[in-house]
Amino acid sequence: MNGVTANGSSHTNGLANGHANGHANGHANGHANGHTNGHANGLVNGASYADDSDDELPAFDATEHPHRRYNPLTRSWVLCSPHRTKRPWQGQEEKPQGTSLPAYDEKCYLCPGNKRATGATNDDYTSTFFFENDYAALMPQAVAEEKNQHPLLQSQPARGRCYVICFNPQHNLTLAQLSTAPFSPDEHIVPIIQSWQKIYKQIPAENPFVKYIQIFENKGSAMGCSNPHPHGQVWSLDYIPEEPSKELASLRAWSQDPANQDPKVNLGACDDHGKPSMLLTLAKLELTTPGQPRVIMANDHFVAIVPYWAVWPFEVLVVPAQRQIRNVLQMTEMEVVSLARIIAQVTCKLDNVFKCSFPYSMGVHQQPTQLATSEDDEFAQFHIHFYPPLLRSASVRKFLVGFEMMAEPQRDLTAEQAAKRIRDCDDVHYLATLEQS
């Protein structure tokens, strides 16, 4: 069986899925990037007892035993320490975010009709609204490169434009709440995705230097969000940033690796050129694994999982399940509706895990703009990452510190345990339930 089952059984599962990520499922990553990484570095645990008989060792239990998991998207590893979830917590606690915000706040810079800090006035919008960020991290002006640089002290100009997308005119809502009546994803989240489409098309047309468009949302003060009004951001850049660049290279390497041409590896999940697709294979693998231990939910076009290699406790990955969709513009109307519905379900269930407005950073990774063509682009697959920091309760969060800063990422809760926690939550937002009681 490929994957750790819901009960976390068998040493075969641990090695099969881990080795599948390091060898078969990411052979390009395990071999090309360094099968050294997959064997010598990745299977240190296996090598350390290579001379011992398996009969003399306790059976591997993914819910109890420390192990490493391979991320083929970034070609990196994460240490999983499930036994640590039993330790008592005596550290910092975050206050859960309140739920008593008004529907309209006259002091909010994002509410309809209000004046922003720079003096500009928002439209009296009734759906979504986007505008150029008044305090952008990038500027559109071109400048010359710094001269006489030392090889150890290199810089390059960064150029771009940044935008803010208000998801809804109502100040006291979140994407999660738009999942539940009187709201609906079809009516209230579809327009957000349509705004993504408009921006993905419009920005490069107006700014030919733009090579990549990063769409993201920081939700909650724990993630550095400075305004509770439901909104996201779009940064357009004249280069392809580190994270999507790594993923694009990994998607290409996986597709071109001869080992992955085997239907037993790619499961027949190929792109529109007939080439193996890592993320389509992942979607099919997760949906066909007995018990679907990491699947949160799926619909006709998308699947949401806690990835096997997740770093954050309740990390979620949303991927297309049926075909190659390189960017948001390539979606059909029905795929847009399906994406809106699964975003609604994911965010609603996350809020319901701890009965709080669950903070997260959410981001879209997709094909660079059509003006920035490269060999990696044809292997792109649209997908969405959710990185939420909460671990044990609404007030206990995970910190990436110490070993994780100095060595490699580490998590306690397994992906399978986290997926079950999210999956078992109600599809109706907890605030709606409280209002009815």
Image: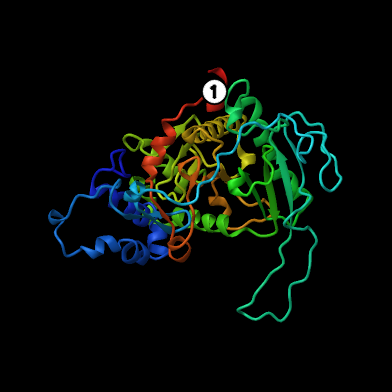
| Near-viewer residue (190 or 90) | 90
Badge 1 marks a residue whose secondary structure is helix
Asked if residue 277 can be seen in this view, the reply is no
Residue sitting at the far right: 119
Q: How dense is the environment of label 1, judged by Cα within 10 Å: few (below 14), some, or many (20 and up)?
A: few
Residue sitting at the far top: 436
Q: Left or right: where does residue 59 sit relative to residue 147?
A: left
Q: Quadrant of residue 168?
A: top right
Above or below 19: residue 40: below
Which residue has dot 1 on it?
A: 434
Q: Amino acid at mark 1?
A: Leu
Q: Who's the residue at 25% across and 43% down the image?
A: 9
> Which quadrant: the N terminus?
top left
Q: Left or right: where does residue 333 sit relative to residue 394?
A: right
Q: Left or right: where does residue 312 sit relative to residue 121?
A: left
Above or below 230: residue 205: below
Asked if residue 82 can be seen in this view, the reply is yes
Q: Left or right: where does residue 244 sit relative to residue 167?
A: left
Coloring applied to the structure: rainbow
Q: Who's the residue at 79% across and 64% down the image?
A: 142
Q: How many marks?
A: 1
Q: Position of residue 124 (x, y in %)?
A: 81, 31
Q: Position of residue 430 (x, y in %)?
A: 52, 27
Q: Position of residue 70 (x, y in %)?
A: 39, 55
Q: Quadrant of residue 306?
A: top left
| Near-viewer residue (313 or 386) | 313
Q: Position of residue 36 (x, y in %)?
A: 35, 67
